[in-house]
Structures are given as structure tokens and as C-alpha cells.
Image (cartoon, grey):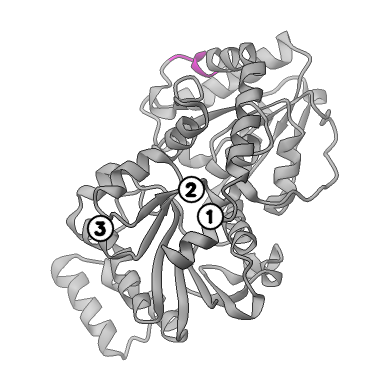
Amino acid sequence: MKVVMYVHGGSKNHGCEAIVRSTAQLLKLDLNQSILLSYNCSEDLQYGLDSVVQLRQEINTINRKSLDFVKAYFMQKIFNKSIYMDALLHKQSINQINNMDIGLFVGGDNYCYSDAEVYPIVNNLIRKKVKKLVLWGTSVEPSVLENNRIRKDIKKFDLIIARESISYNAIKQVNPNTILLPDPAFFLNIEKTELPKNFVKGNTIGINISPMILDYEKNRGKTFENYECLIDYIIEQTDYNIALIPHVIWDSNDDRKVLQQLYKKISDKNRISIVDDHNCMQQKYIISQCAYFIGARTHSTIAAYSTGVPTLVVGYSVKAKGIAKDLFGTYDNYVIPVQDLNQKNNLLNSFLWLEKNTDRIKITLNDKIKEYSELKEEYLKRLING
């Protein structure tokens, strides 16, 4: 089976890396017959994805002498539509692939944002190169489906695998060829690695924060204030250590920058560890050794959920709520929307609820992960037969 994955942002977002690795594992992909079109191949090489799939650069320079450029330039200048120029960045790489059985759109949350209008153009380019086009492990903000261009695009997919039920219910109304399966990263392998200094197995609280959630807060500064309040409580009122864990390290969107700001404000640094960058499997191992995890990045929280770690999500979109709802029957108490942070102790109060309900949460996670593990064969089966 010849498979091409595309719209992969690069492995310095370890969620993107996790999707590719776990997809290759679930679908039993042959390295010689699977291609990853990547926005940044150098990142993927750095984390060893070339041992999983063939790497090809997806984003390339545009030929300014081409007719395509002239048309795109006209649309941009006259109608202020930059999507045609943006789509041209993908065209060269897509033109170089041929006769693939399946195309997998692996940008799991790309349809959660209002700037998704470029993807219908990209998808139309790749439809000419594959026998079946699949929207893979996706979350879609229901309001985005009100955009007619995106709605038409969603209808055209031969198969859609939604990773959580809120998106599933919205997408199913648009495209009946939609099924619900957990995010592939729930099945990501663990790779053991050395734990950092001050990390105590089973008695460390993992904390992840991203610059991205700060853009969604309604009360400026409240998110950071909430993390500070939580950390102060952990240091002063408990014997837990704290691990600050990045999961995306892109220059323009680097968790380490805000984690470093938090670190500077912590008085007792003897109980704090700053986790270095690792591949997604090693990051999952580190997260699995935590007593609790408080995270903003979706795939950092999936790493925690899938290893039975009680987890509180600081979310901003449908994906966080949907994943938690499917695990626990509700997202209340498990997801605190960053938009709702209006008092400095909101996050602390949610953590105290999590701590109080630890035993029940662990049992629920254990049962749910067993249930999910029984679905492993469904991905390949549905891909072939769906």
C-alpha cells in the first residue's frame, strides 16, 4: 500500500512527530512505499523520522515566471486573496508524487482555525495523485464548517477519521463517510530515557505551557498568574517536585520560552527540573513517570492520558474538550478553557479536584486505554474498506 502523508508541520512540534510515528505503526507502513511531505525535513531528520517514512520537502519556493504565479499574484493584489499564493508553495512537491493509493491529511488540528481556506486548494492538487484521500485523526472546530469553501472541501474526502466525538458529530453531518477513532498518538511507543535532575519518579508533577494559549486568554496575564499560583501551592503545601516539560520548540512558538519565565519566578529551585528536548517517544516516557500532568499542548496531554497519568488540560479549542469527554464522559473538571481563567486560583482549584479524585481517574483511564487498545486494527481496516 503506497501512502503519502502531507501537511506535516515538522517534528519540533512533537505532536506532529507523534502522529506520523504512530500512524506508520498502526498502518504497518513499508518505508519504501510511504512518503511524508514535510514543511521542514531538517527537523524530521533531527528526530529520526527518516527511519519511518521517506522524507520530502513540502513547502518550496515559487517559480515567479510561471502562469500559476501570475494568476495567484492577480488574486492577491486585486481580491486580497493570499490563499492561492500560499497553495503554490505546496504545488511543486505534490506534482512530484504519482500513483499513490492513499493520501493522509495528517494536520490533526488544521481545521480548528479560521485560516484553513488554503487547504481546499492543496487537497484538490493532491486528489489528482492519490486513489483515496483521507482526513486523518482530525479535530474540526464546528464553527469553521460554516465556511462554505471548507464545508465543500470536507464533503469531498473519501474518508474522515475524527479523533474525538465533538468533531465527529459536526463532521458527520457534512460528510457521512466519517468514523470515530482515538488520536493515533494514543498508541505511540515509549522510549526510555534518562530522567533529569530533581525528577522523582511517581512524585513529580509535570507542567506544560505554550505561548499559543496566551493568545487565547481573555484576561491578559491571568494564564501565567494561574500557573504561578499552582506552582507556589505545590512548593509550599506539598512534597511533590515539578518538571517543566516542553512539547513544541519551534522558534516562533517555543514552549521553553514561557517555561523559562515560570522557572525564574520559582523560589525553591531544588525541587524543579527543566526537561530538555527529546523525541516524542522519550517525552512520552518522561510524562509517564509523573504523578500528575498539567498541560496545554494536546499531544503532551495524550502522552499523559495514554500512560494513566491524571491530567488537567489548559485548553483553548474543541480538541481538548472532545478528547477529555470521550475518556471521562464529560470535559468538566478535566479541561479548563484558557478563556475562562479570570481568578488567579482557577487552575489551582482544578488541580485540587484532580488530586481528590485521583483513584477514580486512574481506574477510568486504565479501563479506557484497554478499550482503545482493542481498536488498533480498525485504522488499517477502515482505511482499506472505508
What segment carries the magenta color?
343-347
Q: Residue furthest left?
A: 78
Which quarter of the image is occupied by the N terminus? bottom right
Q: Is residue 88 magenta?
A: no
Q: Which residue is disc 2 drawn over?
A: 181
Q: Residues within 10 Å of mark 1 (few under 14, many from 20)?
A: few
Q: Which of marks 3 and 2 is nearer the N terminus?
A: 3
Q: Residues within 10 Å of mark 2 (few under 14, many from 20)?
A: many
Foreground mark, 3 or 2? Answer: 2
Residue 116 in the image: above or below residue 236: below
Which quarter of the image is occupied by the C terminus? bottom left
Please give the name of the residue rendered at 49% of the width and 16% of the height, measured from the top-left corner.
346
Give how far apart the Cα atoms at labels 1 and 3 are: 27 Å
Q: Do the numbered discs 3 and 2 sit on residues whose CB atoms are within 8 Å? A: no
Q: What type is the residue that disc 2 sits on?
A: Leu
Foreground mark, 1 or 3? Answer: 1
Residue 7 position within the rendered picture, expressed as x and y whole percent measured from the top left: 46, 65
